[in-house]
Amino acid sequence: MRKLTRSPLILILTLLLLAASGCQSTRTPAGAETLTATPSPTITPTPTNTPTFTPTHTSTPAFTITSPPTSTPTMTATPFRILSPTPIPSQAPLRPAVLFPLQDNFGITIDWSYIHVTHVGYNDRGEVNDLWAFMAFQLLDRGIHQRNFRFQGETITVYYLNVAHAFGDEPLPMQLVLGGTPGENVPISVIPAGGTAYAQVAIRDGSTYFSPRIAHREANRAFDERDEAYPFLFLHELEALLPELPDELILLANHPILVPRNDWPQVKLDMERVSFLAARYQPFFELDPYDRIVDQSAFAYALRDHIFGREAVPAGIYAFSSRNLIIITGQ
């Protein structure tokens, strides 16, 4: 009985031993290192507060077109580059000429606003670039006045008449240039003989037939072909004559206003050689600091626009010149 009871116990122990040996068979052989994957700490990204750039509306200026400089000159108060601070005083008292009825051969009344084109030419763009005209003036006194201007490093005395011309409703005081001579404040009585000493002057009465174009043609003939009706007077002779003329008096002066650009070198040469031409051309040309012709003067262009477009001439001190001077007196 005791023997039978011990047998089941032995059997149970045997089973337990077998189970333990089965578990050991799965162990790693001695000396082998078992690498066990150790989980590394995972870094969880922490969201950072990144600034967000919000696009702002930038006002971009619109593309603008800059107009190129135009050839239209700016009007200046005086067309003269260099003037005396004041004209040289004259003893001639104020004595404005009196207008009287007079017409040209076209039946146009000659008054203080009278202008008649005696020659006109055009460039290849159809622009007026060659212009002569007779202009009528009111003589304001009976003296010949002087002013100085610098040209080519020398002083030239300019001789002119105090006159007025009506570009609108009221006459505008002007200077009517007769000529000039080298030197400063040179009295008329000591002007050297030559081209600087005289002006071409015709004196007529109100009954005389006047054709501006015929007068232009005849007065500008070659020297040996000129009519005796357009003689040359020395300036001292004209100075003595002016006080003797009646109150009823109209001056008519003819001169180039615009000159073709191709002729500017000749104009510059004439101005350098002859002082009275320098004096007469000066009001119509713009000179740079080196006395080179850069353009026609603002007054020359304003006068062109007034003749062909009836545009107003801004107030200022202006000068016209006399290539041919006609004095017509009342009957």
Image (cartoon, rainbow, N blue to C red):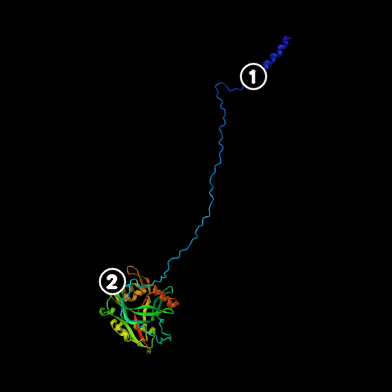
Residue 20: mark: 1
- List x then y, in percent, for residue 148: 30, 74
Q: Residue furthest right?
A: 1
Identify which residue is drawn at 28% across, 71% down: 154
Indicate the quadrant where residue 261 lies. bottom left
The three-letter code of the residue at mark 2 reads Glu
- Residue 128 shows in the view: no
2 or 1: mark nearer the eye: 2
* Quarter of the image with the C terminus in it: bottom left
Q: Quadrant of the N terminus?
A: top right
Does residue 53 lie above or below 298 as drawn?
Answer: above
The first of marks 2 and 1 along the sequence is: 1
**Quadrant assignment, res 273:** bottom left
Residue type at tag 1: Ala
Q: Distance of mark 2 from mark 1, alpha carbons?
A: 137 Å
Residue 190 horizontal/vertical position (percent): 25, 79
Residue 320 shows which numbered tag? none
The residue that mark 2 highlights is 154
Q: Secondary structure at mark 1?
A: helix
As helix, strand or loop, the secondary structure at mark 2 comes to strand
